[in-house]
Amino acid sequence: MRRVVRKGFTEAEILGAAEILVESGVSNLRLYFMIGLPEERVEDVKAIVDLTKKIRHHLLKRSRGLKKRSG
């Protein structure tokens, strides 16, 4: 679906950007997704859920590491 909506970011790039944000002190992210596009499939919606979970996991993992280093 990223190709259809012309968002050419890879999953690795999205996760990398999230990590940069948390390292810069951003502790909360707001994610926006479009659901219900004409060419969308159930797998696409499941991929959104999976990506969101991966982002959350990366942010929590990275923020815990930062807290340990600073304390």
Image (cartoon, rainbow, N blue to C red):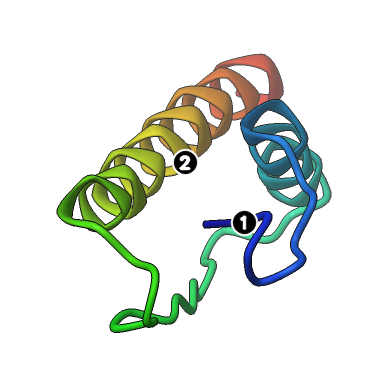
Q: Does residue 58 lie above or below 17 as drawn?
A: above
Image coords of residue 68 (percent x, y): 55, 17
Residue type beneath disc 2: Ile
Query: Image check: 16 left or right of 46?
Result: right
- In the image, which disc is placed on residue 55? 2
Image coords of residue 29 (percent x, y): 54, 67
Q: Nearer the viewer, residue 25 or 39?
A: 39
Query: Image check: 54 left or right of 28?
Result: left
Residue displayed at 77% across by 39% down: 23
Q: Does residue 25 lie above or below 40 as drawn?
A: above
Discs 1/2, front: 1
Q: Nearer the viewer, residue 66 or 59?
A: 59
Q: How many marks?
A: 2
Q: Does residue 13 lie above or below 65 as drawn?
A: below
Quarter of the image that includes the C terminus: top right
Q: Secondary structure at mark 2?
A: helix
Q: Nearer the viewer, residue 55 or 63?
A: 55
Q: Residues within 10 Å of mark 2 (few under 14, many from 20)?
A: many
Query: Image check: 13 left or right of 69?
Result: right
Would you name the residue on which mark 1 appears? 2
Q: Does residue 70 lie above or below 17 as drawn?
A: above
* Comes first in the chain, label 1 or label 2: 1
Residue displayed at 69% across by 26% down: 12
Image coords of residue 10 (percent x, y): 71, 36
Residue displayed at 37% across by 31% down: 57
Where residue 54 sits, quadrant-wise, is: top left
Residue type beneath disc 1: Arg
- In whole angstroms, how far apart are the C-alphas of marks 1 and 2? 17 Å
Residue displayed at 16% across by 55% down: 42
Q: Nearer the viewer, residue 49 or 54?
A: 49
Query: Image check: 8 left or right of 61?
Result: right
Image coords of residue 28 (percent x, y): 52, 66
